[in-house]
Amino acid sequence: EVQLVETGGGLIQPGGSLRLSCAASGVAVNNNYMGWVRQAPGKGLEWVSVMPTSAYTYYADSVKGRFTISRDESKNTLYLQMNSLRADDTAVYYCARIGPRTKYAFDYWGRGTLVTVSS
Amino acid sequence: ENVLTQSPGTLSLSPGERATLSCRASQSFSNSYLAWYQQKPGQAPRLLIYGASSRATGIPDRFSGSGSGTDFTLTISRLEPEDFAVYYCQQYGNSPPWTFGQGTKVELK
């Protein structure tokens, strides 16, 4: 069974940094496309970043240059380093896998971790 | 940028009725890369449909997807009480690679 568990969220001041972790079980983060999707309170889903099986990475324009996605094969964990945080980064951040046969759709999701950027 | 516009914003229906949700793209793209998700309050999204018309694992056959080019549809043939939720479409394309629609809420009439 695939499980994705996000941690690392919390309250952070504008301009601050935070690192989110996504511990995976039942799926190898280095052998799958893995990504982050966020949802601001009461709003819709917004794609944030995806890391394919190669070293290439993809970022939404809204986070490019501020967020960095990475993975640790030994810990089977996906990360999202978030710097220069702004109020509009406030959201629940979901870790998700892109299935090998789902035509780039996200087939497994974690329960999410809430990031609140506020002074 | 390919913008996905979902309609209607809210759909008020009763159990047993048919729900038809629309997702329109501003630019044509391969229908292989269109997905639908269901999200209930306080829960993560759940993949329903990928490749425009393929049901994900464990999804009941009352959910079906269709469409091509710029116009896609999610149909729920007979609404069950657990189907009242928000539904999102998502496409994979060029720039940005992944895009979500703004969502359609299916609410109890």
Image (spheres, rainbow, N blue to C red):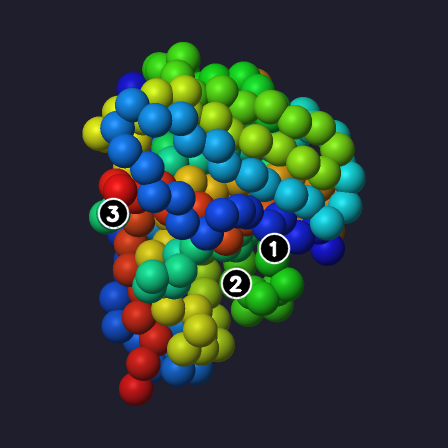
Label 3 Cα crowd, 10 Å radius (few <14 / some 14-19 / many 20+): few
Q: How many marks?
A: 3
State which chain disc 2 sits on: A
Residue located beneath label 3 in the image: B41
* Separation (CA) of disc 2 from disc 1: 8 Å
Q: Decide: marks 2, 1 in contact (CB < 8 A)? A: yes
Q: Which residue occupies 34% across, 61% down?
A: A42
State which chain disc 3 sits on: B
Residue type marked 2: Phe
Residue located beneath label 2 in the image: A67
Depth check, front residue: A42 or B78: B78
Give me the disc on residue B39: none
Q: Which residue occupies 66% across, 52% down?
A: B3
Image quarter where the C terminus of chain A lies is bottom left
Residue located beneath label 1 in the image: A59
Q: Position of residue A31 (x, y in %)?
A: 52, 27
